[in-house]
Image: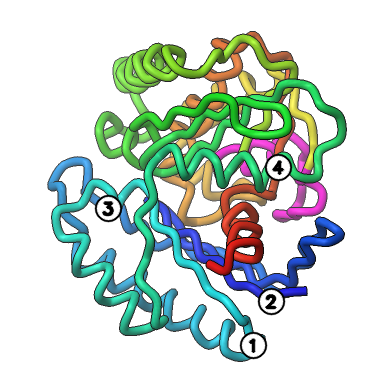
């Protein structure tokens, strides 16, 4: 048994998992799992740089996570950074700040590595051996990976709920023209992804990350966010379409009043839901299997098996 800590720092959120991993039995037991919306990718699509206030929000979360890691006595720590820090000119400021707080440098992974970790985390506990398409909808990018026992093809494309919202949405609720512009970017990205990943071949569509889990929470009618109820739930295409339409027609205050809605997702959930809907339409999927286990779990497993 190895006690590991994994940190996933994306465009919208930073998340921590401290867990006991037992490679012999294939079990990963959570000790602490938490998420903080820091919006590290604020303005990156427009400026190419990480904003000072976004860096400070991220460093504050890192200081909180450092205390948790120390208290629980994790033997190994891996910090993985994804889309926003890949895109930023001043990512050295980010790297230096993280190292000063946590004692490790953030590993800015490629989109393909991100997809592999997501696939491992999402599918390790799923039954059966059918072809699975894992879709990880992030703030700045979306990863597609298909396989059975392992990754057969993967592609990362630059569409995400934060990136598309900042790029196109100015109104509340968004206008039809703004929604159409978001949709056009999504369809172009799906065309690109489909050059590498056969999106229509999988028997199961598995959806990851906050946009997907939030849509699932709404679909399930939860009075509060409940990861146990959401994990491995199956949400029909018709329900996703209904929720997406409602979100895109709602005002900020109406979205904020949804019981499962995290405050940091209120302004970007419409674009995130639209990505999910477009993916389901492209794949011909009648439902999406929602997983609370994702890239964070994949990072933890890789850390336990490979020593970081």
Q: Of the residues tagged 3 and 2, which is closer to the observer?
A: 2
Q: CA distance from mark 2 to mark 4?
A: 23 Å
Assess disc 4: are there few (<14), some (14-19) or many (≥20) residues with their C-alpha within 10 Å of its C-alpha.
many
Magenta: predominant secondary structure element? helix
Quickly name the residue at label 3: 42
Task: Point out residue 28 in the picture as x, y percentages from the top left corner.
Answer: 77, 62
Residue located 44% across and 28% down the image:
155
Q: Quadrant of residue 189?
A: top left
Residue at screen point 74% across, 72% down: 20
Horizontal side, residue 127 vs residue 48: left or right: right
- The answer to whether residue 150 is visible is yes
- Counting from the top left corner in percent of width and height, residue 16 is at 56, 67
Q: Which residue is mark 2?
A: 3
Residues in magenta? Answer: 209-231
- Mark nearer the N terminus (3 vs 4): 3
Disc 3, SS: loop
Tag 1–tag 2 contact (CB < 8 Å): yes
Above/below status of 95 relative to 226: below
Of pointers 1 and 2, the one earlier in the residue sequence:
2
Cα gap from disc 3 to disc 2, whole angstroms? 33 Å
Instruction: Determine the secondary structure under disc 2.
Output: strand
User: 155 and 84: which one is in front?
Assistant: 155
Q: CA distance from mark 3 to mark 4?
A: 26 Å
> Which is more N-terminal, label 4 or label 2?
2
């Amino acid at each position: 048994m190895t006690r590991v800590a994994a940190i996933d720092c994306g465009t919208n959120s930073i998340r921590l998992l401290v867990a006991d991993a037992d490679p012999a039995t294939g079990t990963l037991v959570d000790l602490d799992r938490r998420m903080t919306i820091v919006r590290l990718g604020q303005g990156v699509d427009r400026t190419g740089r990480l904003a000072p206030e976004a860096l400070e929000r991220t460093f504050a979360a890192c200081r909180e996570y450092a205390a948790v890691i120390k208290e629980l006595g994790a033997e190994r720590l891996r910090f993985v950074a994804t889309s926003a820090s890949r895109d930023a000119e001043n990512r050295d400021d980010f790297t230096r700040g993280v190292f000063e707080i946590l004692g490790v440098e953030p590993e800015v992974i490629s989109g393909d590595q991100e997809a592999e970790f997501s696939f491992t985390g999402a599918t390790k506990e799923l039954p059966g051996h059918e072809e699975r398409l894992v879709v990880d909808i992030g703030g700045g990018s979306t990863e597609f990976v298909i396989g059975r026992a392992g990754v057969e093809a993967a592609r990362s494309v630059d569409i995400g709920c934060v990136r598309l919202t900042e790029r196109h949405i100015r109104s509340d609720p968004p206008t039809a023209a703004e929604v159409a512009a978001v949709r056009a970017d999504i369809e172009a990205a799906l065309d690109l992804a489909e050059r590498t990943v056969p999106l229509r071949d999988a028997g199961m569509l598995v959806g990851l990350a906050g946009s997907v889990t939030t849509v699932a929470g709404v679909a399930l009618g939860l009075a509060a966010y409940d990861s146990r109820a959401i994990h491995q739930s199956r949400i029909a295409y018709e329900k996703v379409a209904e929720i997406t339409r409602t979100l895109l027609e709602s005002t900020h205050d109406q979205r904020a009043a949804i019981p499962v809605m995290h405050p940091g997702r209120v302004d970007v959930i419409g674009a995130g839901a639209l990505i999910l809907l477009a993916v389901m339409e492209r794949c011909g999927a009648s439902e999406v299997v929602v997983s609370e286990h994702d890239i964070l779990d994949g990072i933890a497993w890789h850390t336990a098996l490979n020593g970081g």
